[in-house]
Amino acid sequence: MSRPNTMKALAKSHPREGLWMVQAPVPEIGPDEVLIKVKKTGICGTDIHIWNWDEWAAHTVPVPMITGHEFAGEIVEIGRNVTDLEVGQRCSGEGHLIKTDSRQSRAGKFHLDPGTRGIGVNEQGAFAQYLKLPAFNVVPLPDDIPDEIGAILDPLGNAVHTALSFDLLGEDVLITGAGPIGIMAAAVAKHAGARHVVITDINPDRLTLAEHVVPAVRAVNVAQEDLQDVVRELGLKQGFDVGLEMSGSQAALDQMVEALVMGGKIALLGIPPGKSPVDWSRIVFKAITIKGVYGREMFETWYKMIAMLQNGLDVSRVITHRFGVDDFADGFAAMKSGSSGKVVLDWT
Ligand code: ZN
């Protein structure tokens, strides 16, 4: 390709609130890497933390840093050792960069590698015209998956990883937190054969969006409705079989434990703020299994989600806002409103 020397990138250039559109050098790739021309990117909650420059971001993210990790694009250059990818291939990719020397990686559990580094957080990210990525991390996109869905496969992967933590076929599922990942998890749970899927929140806009994206879901505003009434309304004998916690809210986790059957299972993706009190005796006496979920399984989650998308899983309505990248500030404002679904920026 005729390779430009510089590119537009959305960077944390100063250790304070905001992000800045800068000119940055186009990355040089190594022998095992590819260069991707970025087409569409998704804004993540993580990016909002970095924009806001909260305590977590200030402690984690070195400045300057090109942000962003949710992307779809096209390979424009491949390293000399890369044999299984081609220039012109449309792709998304896993933004967690792993090493191969840990016990977990050597067992094939790459998503559990303790040396994981994230693009857009620890390494230069995807909010740019070009992104350098190890070929290992590239996930080719089939023709029937459009770029804007490719740009949200990272959070869809969080939803899929969480939802498929337990067998959902014929099960009644409670999801706490109707942000984009919770809503996509509801779609996945229905697709995976769950009987009843209930999603809770206290934000009416998000619950409306949940019903819009997944018409078969029962959305419950727990500020107005008692979950136990919903359990009765649905005719559940004891409660829900599986809980997917997506909010990080202590109250939501408490409600989930109360609403679960004996021997129920919980997958936790939401991140509680600091240490929070939990009634462990309730969890012990109900014999509840709890699993923490981080990232996406490499690459089983990616395989499953692409297969489900090709087999009728539809999360497209979770994208509520689209902006050209020069209007990135509007995109971040939409995200910060707390009422949006996914916000996608167009780099083309
Ligand atoms: Zn993300």
Image: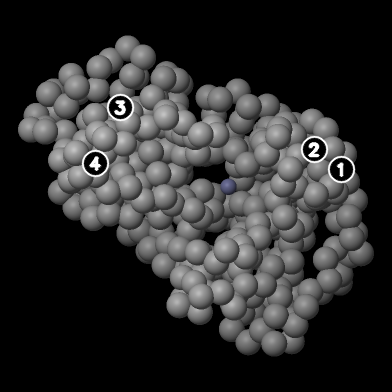
| Contact? badges 2 and 4 (CB < 8 Å) | no
Residue 145 locus on image (x, y percent): 49, 58
From what the image shows, is residue 303 above or below residue 125? below
Nearest to N terminus: mark 3 or mark 2:
2
Please state the horizontal and vertical placement of residue 253, each as a whole percent of the image. Answer: 36, 32
Q: Mark 3 points at which residue?
A: 255
SS class of the residue under badge 2?
Answer: loop
Expressed as whole percent of the image width and height from the top left, the position of residue 125 reads 73, 55
**Do the numbered discs 2 and 1 sit on residues whose CB atoms are within 8 Å?**
yes
Q: Distance between the residues labelled 2 and 1?
A: 7 Å
Residue underneath mark 2: 19
User: Residue flagged by tag 4: what amino acid is it?
Assistant: Val
- Gap in Å between the C-alphas at discs 2 and 4? 45 Å
Distance from label 3 to label 1 (Cα)?
Answer: 42 Å
**Image quarter for residue 260?**
top left
Q: Which residue is drawn at 18% across and 19% down?
A: 229
The residue mark sitting in front, 2 or 4, is 4
Quarter containing the N terminus: bottom right
Tell whether 337 sits left or right of 107: right
Q: Is mark 3 on a helix, strand or loop?
A: helix
Three-letter amino acid code of the residue under disc 2:
Leu
Residue holding disc 1: 13
Q: Callout 1: helix, strand or loop?
A: loop
Residue 339, given in percent of the width and then of the height, sits at: 53, 24
